[in-house]
Image (cartoon, coloured by chain):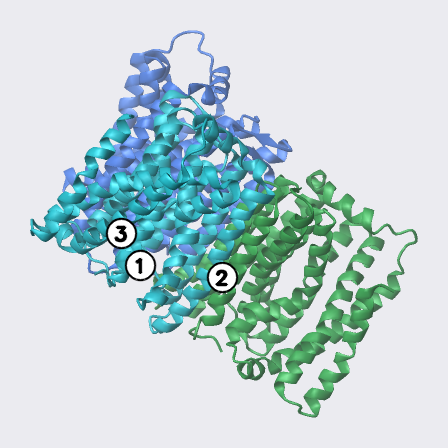
Chain colours: A blue, B cyan, C green
Amino acid sequence: MSGKNILFLVLLLFIPVSIAAHYLEWGELTVFITAGLAILPLAGWMGTATEEVAVVVGPTVGGLLNATFGNATELIIALVALNAGLVNVVKASITGSIIGNLLLVMGLSMFLGGLRHKEQTFQPVVARVNASSMNLAVIAILLPTAMKFNSQAIQEKTLQNLSLAVAVVLILVYALTLLFSMKTHTYLYDVGMAETTEDETHLKKPNIWLWTGVLLVCTLLVALESELLVDSLEVATSELGLTALFTGVIVVPIIGNAAEHATAVTVAMKDKMDLSVSVAVGSSMQIALFVAPFLVLAGRVLGQPMDLNFNLFELVAVVVAVFIANSISSDGKSNWLEGVLLLAAYAVLGFAFYFLPFVDGMA
Amino acid sequence: MSGKNILFLVLLLFIPVSIAAHYLEWGELTVFITAGLAILPLAGWMGTATEEVAVVVGPTVGGLLNATFGNATELIIALVALNAGLVNVVKASITGSIIGNLLLVMGLSMFLGGLRHKEQTFQPVVARVNASSMNLAVIAILLPTAMKFNSQAIQEKTLQNLSLAVAVVLILVYALTLLFSMKTHTYLYDVGMAETTEDETHLKKPNIWLWTGVLLVCTLLVALESELLVDSLEVATSELGLTALFTGVIVVPIIGNAAEHATAVTVAMKDKMDLSVSVAVGSSMQIALFVAPFLVLAGRVLGQPMDLNFNLFELVAVVVAVFIANSISSDGKSNWLEGVLLLAAYAVLGFAFYFLPFVDGMA
Amino acid sequence: MSGKNILFLVLLLFIPVSIAAHYLEWGELTVFITAGLAILPLAGWMGTATEEVAVVVGPTVGGLLNATFGNATELIIALVALNAGLVNVVKASITGSIIGNLLLVMGLSMFLGGLRHKEQTFQPVVARVNASSMNLAVIAILLPTAMKFNSQAIQEKTLQNLSLAVAVVLILVYALTLLFSMKTHTYLYDVGMAETTEDETHLKKPNIWLWTGVLLVCTLLVALESELLVDSLEVATSELGLTALFTGVIVVPIIGNAAEHATAVTVAMKDKMDLSVSVAVGSSMQIALFVAPFLVLAGRVLGQPMDLNFNLFELVAVVVAVFIANSISSDGKSNWLEGVLLLAAYAVLGFAFYFLPFVDGMA
């Protein structure tokens, strides 16, 4: 059994601990921390289970599974928060997932990978297509915010209608990027794929019932723990002296993405930069083109209407992150200094969110 | 006779219809639609006539002719609107022409071309020079708007002086880009040229008098029809439930650019991507570096002073369009997904302009 | 003796003249102009002396010397202005140095170099690393300004704390870029280096005591003349009908950077584009990643706290300059038209700063 799995089993103990903390009222901060720790192994196993099931059901359905459940943990946390009416926490965690994946994960990968390898390369065409997709997502977030900014008197209803229309466009584009990568232009993605399978040769077919079971149980438990996390979030963060915005943008996404962070960094150090970049950028693309618009649609159904009108500062953070990540990745080469630049951008954004005293409308 | 010419002849019937509609007071909406339809064949023939005359007078004068009359229809509509004091309609149609060419035309070209050809290529150096020129144009539009934004108390006179100075710089740069492409660095543009002539080999010299005549008559008729279009614009659009801004940004440019749209898409499907991109980007460059500053100068002469202070939302649209178009075209390669991304950006912007309820200062 | 040195000796006469002008009260305008002229040769010799000393002490210490004293003139002027409490003049000159180096110097180099050579090339990897570093610097300036903008009620103390944290990150990144270029990835910079030494082969070792003396004397005199320049700045510029902002952004940086301008343009005409670009971009990187954060720290020590909250218009200027310079330099190729585009961007920004009537908070 790998070291990772042993760590995960230990962390699993936090599931009963967090539940106990909640019912025995050990304090919101304790609930928040233990629920956060309990989510880590669950998120990790959901990732593994998704991949194993994907192997059995074949590339097409498997690809769709990966594309839909790849950010399942974040989606669940966001749905729970949305249902609780914490629309601004949801927006903050979308912002945080995008900048976390593009700057922290990709930055750490390029930095640590670059310390071992002088220059690392990856498919520039894929990097460019991803960059353009992220640009589109930025535009989609930019417009409702700019509209709100342009005339404060704008009706919330109009913003929601625009956000709905934009969400439908984004989900359509997401579907088409899947078609592109899995059907019409697979050869561009072959390098990354080869690297994956080389690593995870399945001599015997994985047991689909076992892994589907794991997937279901983990999904259920994550939902459960997410409730504890979201319920305790506001009190816990104010006890820590943090704003809800900082927590939503910096703390929550680190919890939700921990497993992917580990994967991306590990493969980068093995010089499989194609896979590393595709995990980091792919994850942020999924958030921007699928999770965020899905939440807009879900909000309509749940009666918790969510628009894409982010606060100015979140918008700046996303624009800046996408811009610098694109400019660094577009040539298909990386070195340790480029990793440092991404990490520095993340640090600077982190400081800004830390010092930001109060944001209008932020719960 | 080609199918296109038969269609054009039929559309020609709308010239008398639109005039009748105007004088017999069939309603402004009827005038608007029939005048719009009547302009389509005239714009198409003006393009053909310009090219035929250009063949006779030689590459240098011909290039200048193309560079000046290439967007003649839009220029005429804009001049008529400017003369009628509809400064905001003029600005809206400039915005719309730029985003229409970069996103709709180039997007359709890359999408439909990409459906037939897995990967299409074009001169990256030309794409980059064009991209940088468009960036300069964006800066030129950005500064007066930012200045207005920076201090609301700024005098209209100052904005106009700045706009005049900026307009002179842009026209100068436009002249130098012509010098670059037609004199000092022609070899970069050779591929596209070769494709054009290959297609339109002239075994016998075209009749210059005939085509000059066509050019003059069409110009006259477009001026005429533009009056009808502009006069009926406000009432007609409000009858359709559209804002003047949406009409100016989305509807008018589609009418004015229809012929170019058809050309760009047709050649893209024949895998002549160099020509297709140069039509789309070239046209938007001409609008930004020649038509817009020319209108600023013309406005001064006509006593209808126009500055380059666009509304915030138009500015965002232009910035966003130039940015995503540059990021997609800068590598000299395209595929159908990149076309989809441009079209999606256009759709998202279109939704935003549709939902925008009211823009300060928009007539 | 070269023509440059004769010119410098003549300009040296302005040292006593400027001092006389100050004490004999010949008018602030006279003091301003003569002090400005006196600084030109001093700045030139400081550059030469730094390079000569760098040759003797070896590449590592020499590189550090160059990296620290490369913008010594500007640093001294800024420190004097900061000490006099002219925080906004300091910010304006930082803005001006960045846009001056990226647009005016690089533009002139590419334009004049491009007139002689059809296409010039330079290391694209270095250009990209520099571009990404400048993007980071832009983010660092953007955030405090965006924060101020997001909520006007923000406390000055918070802005200063954020600026301090950001300044520390930037200086750290600057140190790491030096490590990258001088230690781990020197081979990327070899071309440029080879060109330098080829030009300045030192058959005999330069006299380190002589040049250290020159460096010290020049530094002292520049400090002195900077006092005269800064003291007379406000009155002199209002006599010239210029705003303090225009002087800070356009006039002062031209004085402070004159020597580098000459170097970059001269080597570009000799087709040593690597060196030319590295002088222009390197200088603006040094300003952004070292001089600006250093001044934030120095301000704290001098009791003249300076934050990185630039006015909106300066921010726009820097963003725009970095963006267009990156887009033009990222392919490692240049021609005369690209030079024109940079110069046009500089002209347009210059007009905007000239027409800007009043900026809040600008002394």
Query: Which mark lies nearer to you, 1 or 3?
Result: 3
Q: Give coordinates of residue C172: x percent, y percent.
A: 60, 52
Residue B223 disc label: 3
The chain letter under disc 3 is B
Quarter of the rendering containing residue C217: bottom right
Residue C102 occupies quadrant: bottom right
Residue holding disc 2? C348
Extreme-top residue of the structure: A204
Label pair 3/2, CB-CB below 8 angstroms: no
Query: Residue C73's quadrant in the figure?
Result: bottom right
Q: Are marks 1 and 3 on the same chain?
A: yes
Amino acid at dot 1:
Asn
**Label drawn at residue B142:** none
* Disc 1 from disc 2: Cα separation: 19 Å
Q: At numbered mark 3, what does the secondary structure look like: helix, strand or loop?
A: helix
Q: Spatial distance from mark 1 to mark 3, Cα to Cα?
A: 27 Å
- What amino acid is found at the position of numbered circle 2 in the picture? Val
Mark 1 chain: B
**Which is more toward the observer, A193 or A75?**
A193
Q: Earlier in the sequence, mark 1 or mark 3?
A: 3
Dot 1 falls on a residue whose secondary structure is loop
Residue found at the far bottom of this picture: C24
Q: Which residue is mark 1?
A: B311
Which SS class for mark 2? Answer: helix
Mark 3 to mark 2 CA distance (whole Å):
33 Å
For discs 1 and 2, the disc positioned in front in the rendered view: 2
> Residue at the location (66% across, 83% down)?
C31
Closer to the camera in the image, A158 or A310? A158
**Above or below for B301 versus C117:** below
Taking the image as shown, residue A341 lies to the left or right of residue B10, namely right
